[in-house]
Image (cartoon, rainbow, N blue to C red):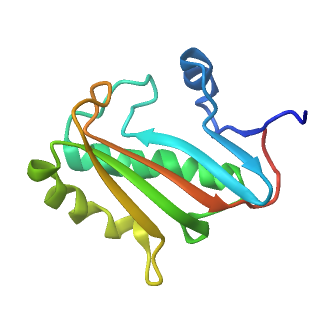
Amino acid sequence: MEKRDVVFPAGRQALYERNRYSPAIRSNGFLFVSGQVGSRDDGSPEPDLKAQVRRAFDNLNAILTAAGSSFDDVIDVTIFMVDPAATFERIWEVVPEYWGGAPHPTLTAVGVTWLYGFQFEIKVIARAGEANSG
């Protein structure tokens, strides 16, 4: 069995090791990115919802960059929102800052009751860039 080709963003490896998961794995030309939340460098939630969404996208973009990819390479997106009826519109005001133009990736949005103190999480599958981390 091949060893997993793990991609770590700069400066956050200890956070992933502490929580025992990989931020992303490159496999067969794809990059599978774990759900990213709006965590500060110490892992704590960003308290403001819009700032939390921006930080989640920034964390995602750090992983994509470390993998030699960008949001333009994203194929499939799954987002999780606590209380979507109350938060969706505010979240969706931030998304276009990162999303880019059409054609857009596929999207699944899921309402959840708990995200470990966070209100928003995004996970993606993207085309993998060249190996430059791991």
107 left or right of 28? Answer: left
Q: Residue at x 40, y 64 (%)?
A: 107
Q: Which residue is drawn at 57% across and 48% down?
A: 62
Q: From the top left corner, tell me how far across and down residue 1 is, in percent.
A: 90, 33
Position of 29 relative to 131 (above/below) = below
> Which residue, as the protein is rendered here, is positioned at the far bottom?
102
Q: Which residue is drawn at 18% across and 56% down?
A: 88
Q: In which quarter of the image is the C terminus?
A: top right
Position of 84 relative to 10 (above/below) = below
96 left or right of 123? Answer: left
Position of 12 relative to 70 (above/below) = above
Q: Which residue is drawn at 77% across and 50% down?
A: 27
> Which residue, as the protein is rendered here, is positioned at the far right?
1
Q: From the top left corner, tell me how far across and down residue 5 is, in percent.
A: 80, 40
Q: From the top left corner, tell me how far across and down residue 92 is, in percent.
A: 24, 63
The residue nearer to you, when weighing 11 against 84, is 84
> Which residue, as the protein is rendered here, is positioned at the far left?
86
31 left or right of 96? Answer: right
102 left or right of 90? Answer: right
Q: From the top left corner, tell me how far across and down residue 25 is, in percent.
A: 70, 43
Q: Which of the 4 image quarters holds residue 16?
A: top right
The residue nearer to you, when weighing 39 against 127, is 127
The residue nearer to you, when weighing 55 against 95, is 95
Q: How many marks?
A: 0
